Image (spheres, rainbow, N blue to C red):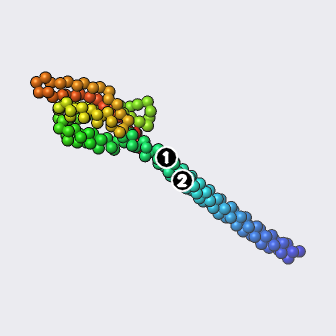
Amino acid sequence: MKKVVNKTYVSFLIAFGFMSLGALSLTGLIYVIEDNAVTLRDRVSAIAYEKAQEKERYETERLLEETKDERAELSSIVLTEESVIDFITSIENIAGSSGLNFKTQTITPEATKDKNFDELSIKFNFSGSRSSVEYMMSVFETVPYHSYIRELSIRQSEAENIWTVEMVLVVTIIQHDT
């Protein structure tokens, strides 16, 4: 009977060893599966983020393409912040070629109710002959940008027949998000 107990005991130890080995293998597999699941979740999140970025880029490109004509039209009548100096320089060049003594005194940005646009208040002083002053006033009246004359003062000196103008021109500029 001792031999039977011994065989049962050995069989029990072998079965227990295989069961322990199976439990350890199962625990290891669960750990590997959990680790792979975390990696997979991270990859899925990264792919979803990339797809969202790609969709956003596509929507932005589509919007830019759809609004190309409107933006071109808007840029022809509204100054950008970058083109203000060019605008003032061209006004000063026109005044100089007309024989006027011309000076840009102040440039003051002013906020508007519309968050996309601001206004620039530009104060000019110039003097010269009546015909030169009239020509310069016609230039200001026909500026191809959205603008208006806020203040205007014209004086004529009696002795030299020189006309002096002080004016404030308000020009609309478009604001860009930065």
Whole-percent x and y of residue 103?
20, 35
Q: What quarter of the picture does the N terminus occupy? A: bottom right
Q: What quarter of the picture does the C terminus occupy? A: top left
Residue of label 2: 58
Which residue is at a point 33% across and 43% down the rendered structure image?
83
Nearer to us in this view, 70 or 138:
138
Question: Which quadrant of the view contains residue 11?
Answer: bottom right
146 over 30 or under it: above or below: above
Left or right, 113 with respect to 2, comes to left
Nearer to us in this view, 7 or 65:
65
Q: CA distance from mark 1 to mark 2?
A: 14 Å
Q: Residue furthest bottom?
A: 3
Left or right, 54 with respect to 124, comes to right
Q: Crowding at label 2, few (<14), some or many (≥20) Cα neighbours within 10 Å?
A: few
Residue 151, which numbered label?
none
Question: Which quadrant of the view contains residue 104?
Answer: top left
Whole-percent x and y of residue 130?
19, 30
The amino acid at mark 1 is: Thr
Question: Circle 2 sits in a helix, a strand or a loop, which is it?
Answer: helix
Nearer to us in this view, 69 or 81:
69
Which residue is at a point 17% across and 32% down the rendered structure image?
128
89 over 8 or under it: above or below: above
Q: Residue furthest left?
A: 159
78 over 159 or under it: above or below: below
Asked whether the residues under the numbered discs 1 and 2 touch, taking CB atoms below 8 Å apart as contact, a structural biologist would say no
Nearer to us in this view, 122 or 23:
122
Residue of label 1: 67
* Disc 1 versus disc 2: nearer the observer: 1
Which residue is at a point 39% across and 43% down the rendered structure image?
76
Left or right, 128 with respect to 113, comes to left
Question: Circle 1 sits in a helix, a strand or a loop, which is it?
Answer: loop
